[in-house]
Image (tube, helix red, strand yellow):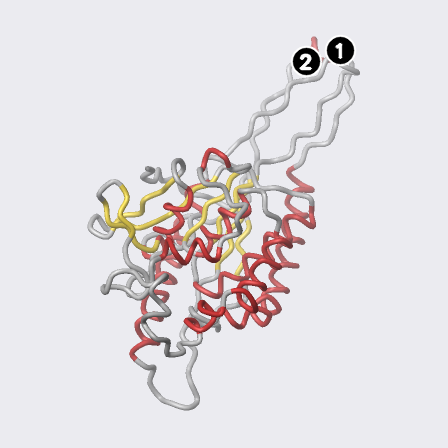
Amino acid sequence: MTAEMSAPSPIHGKHPVRTPRIGLALGGGGARGLAHIGMLEAFDELGVKPAVIAGTSIGAIYGAAYASGISGRELREHTRIILSQRFGLIRDLFLATAQPLQRLRNVFGRRDAILNSATVLDVILPKQVKDDFAECAIPLKVVASDFYDQEPRVFTAGQLRTAVSASMALPALFQPVVVNGRALIDGGLTNPLPFDLLMTEADIIVAIDVSGVPVPNSRRAVPTAFEALFASAFLFERTIIREKLKSAQPDILISAGTSHYQVLDFLKFDEILEAAAPAKEKLKQQLARVLSVETLPELSISESEILRVEAPKRKRRALLSRGRRAPKQD
């Protein structure tokens, strides 16, 4: 993938610095995706902004917030408040505490699911998150899955919260979200790490993998039915990611280091971010190194040299070979 070179400046005969376009893919993984906060902080600390973001499930949640102009540090504080103080009802749900149905009426959907994703999203998203894709400071792609077509659906325009609600609608936990007559569910079931959506739109692709694996419980030999239900979906997603990486790879692939946490471990917020801290530093190091290679310095040349010599087109060396596949978009 080759970005266009900046034209020579007529002032002082210099080329301006060209910074490569960075595409950021934020994967799905339930509570493990809290690690995305640290990765977004890494971008902020480097003073770098992605040119485009693609997100699935919890990656879509944090991608939407970041694309709306909310910093990684602000997301850390907002999430801590949600999980520790302001929303005891959500906290109780993640603890699987028995609650009277009357107390849950505002978050329960129809009887065919536990929760309504749109209502929960209204509770957990910062109020500054934009209503429409067009209002975002950074272009955003949100991945959901069409239940009947068994294909990914990529949202790039329209109502942002509706798209994110569909992307996070994990079956059994959330009811499907109907958009244009189509029943949509969690995007991780078809594209859990959507770096492929960015291949034609950025020079450098960064992918954050927060998928996980089941962890044995020393107190029992087999998982409970509840554990097996959710773990099976993420086993499937991890398999999809492995197969995708056989045919195409991002330039920077970061495993968040949170794979041993489970899908509803949201109350282990501080533990998860601490576990992801080494991955955050690794991202900063790799991103800084790649940018130092890919960013063009200013070149001082005279106007006469510009007239006499036509600069050859520079083909950027791909850091890793990449496949190309055009996704469906809504």
Residue 217, horizontal then vertical, whole percent: 42, 85
Give the structural element (helix, strand or loop) at label 1: helix
Residue 111 place in picture, x, y as percent: 23, 65
Q: Residue furthest left?
A: 148
Residue identified by numbered label 1: 303
The amino acid marked with disc number 2 is Val
Q: Is residue 324 above or below residue 225?
A: above
Local SS, label 2: loop
In x, y percent, where is residue 55?
45, 49
Residue type at numbered disc 1: Glu
Which residue sits at x=49%, y=53%?
125
The residue at which mark 2 appears reads as 309
Count neighbours of disc 1 (C-alpha within 10 A) and say few if under 14, some if 14 to 19, many if 20 or more: some
**Along the line of sight, the residue nearer the viewer: 253 or 272:** 272
For the residue pair 18 and 119, the one nearer the viewer reads as 119
Give the residue drawn at x 68%, y 13%: 309
Q: Quadrant of residue 295?
A: top right
Which is more toward the observer, 206 or 83? Answer: 83
Residue toward you, 268 or 243: 268
Which residue is drawn at the image coordinates 27% and 64% (left, top)? Answer: 113
Q: CA distance from mark 1 to mark 2?
A: 10 Å
Q: Which residue is most to the front?
A: 102
